[in-house]
């Protein structure tokens, strides 16, 4: 019963979008820092180690004038990279070309003018063994936005 209530609550606060069939994103009305904290906790709670945090928003803002732009794309945007040794071995034993998807990434972003709306998501994985990775990413995202 608790999981049904939790799922109902998530449906009220998160909206799902499949971005051009390349990514799954959720927009939530949670504070950006709360989503980041939830994401970090969800990753480490699964016994995974965050390999890197790419501060894409800061980099784009810092370099916009250098590339001749005046556009602020994100207020904040990070990509969290991590891997699962067991799952990576499984999918790469099935097809060594699955190496191209490792490490796995989950992004969090907030766009200008959208204060109070935080987006979180991940790339859609191809059919076959990588769908198990996608299920892991979905589980982590759901845990991150449920806290």
Image: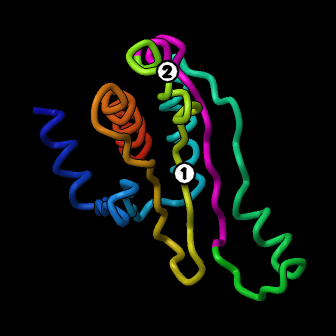
Q: Which one is nearer the viewer's eye here, 84 or 90?
A: 90
Specify the quadrant that holds the N terminus: top left
10 Å crowding of disc 2: few (<14), some (14-19), many (20+): few
The image quarter containing residue 81 is top right
The image quarter containing residue 103 is top right
Secondary element under disc 1, as helix, strand or loop, is: strand
Task: State left or right for residue 86 relative to residue 15.
Answer: right
> Who's the residue at 57% across and 47% down the image?
36
The image quarter containing residue 16 is bottom left
Counting from the top left corner in percent of width and height, residue 107 is at 54, 51
> Who's the residue at 60% across and 53% down the image?
33
Q: Residue furthest right?
A: 66
User: What mark, if any, has residue 92 been given in the picture?
Assistant: none
Counting from the top left corner in percent of width and height, residue 14 is at 31, 59
Q: Residue furthest left?
A: 1
Q: Label 1 vs label 2: CA separation?
A: 25 Å
- Identify the magenta region: 74-90
Counting from the top left corner in percent of width and height, residue 99 is at 54, 27
Tally of numbered discs: 2
| Residue 36 drawn above or below residue 3 | below
Residue occupied by mark 1: 107
Residue occupied by mark 2: 96
| Residue 40 drawn above or below residue 72 | above
Q: Is residue 109 magenta?
A: no
> Who's the residue at 44% across and 48% down the image?
123
10 Å crowding of disc 1: few (<14), some (14-19), many (20+): many
> Who's the residue at 37% across and 47% down the image?
124
Specify the quadrant that holds the C terminus: top left
């Amino acid at each position: 019963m608790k999981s049904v209530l939790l799922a109902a609550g998530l449906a009220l606060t998160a909206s799902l979008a499949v971005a051009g069939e390349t990514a799954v994103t959720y927009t939530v009305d949670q504070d950006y820092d709360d989503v980041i904290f939830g994401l970090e906790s969800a990753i480490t709670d699964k016994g995974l180690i965050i390999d890197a945090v790419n501060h894409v928003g800061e980099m784009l803002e810092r370099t916009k004038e250098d590339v001749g732009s005046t556009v602020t794309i994100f207020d904040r945007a990070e990509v969290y990279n991590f891997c699962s040794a067991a799952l990576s071995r499984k999918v790469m034993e099935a097809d060594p070309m699955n190496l191209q998807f490792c490490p796995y990434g989950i992004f969090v972003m907030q766009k200008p003018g959208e204060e109070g709306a935080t987006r979180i998501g991940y790339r859609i994985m191809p059919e076959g063994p990588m769908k198990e990775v996608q299920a892991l990413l979905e589980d982590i995202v759901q845990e991150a936005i449920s806290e």
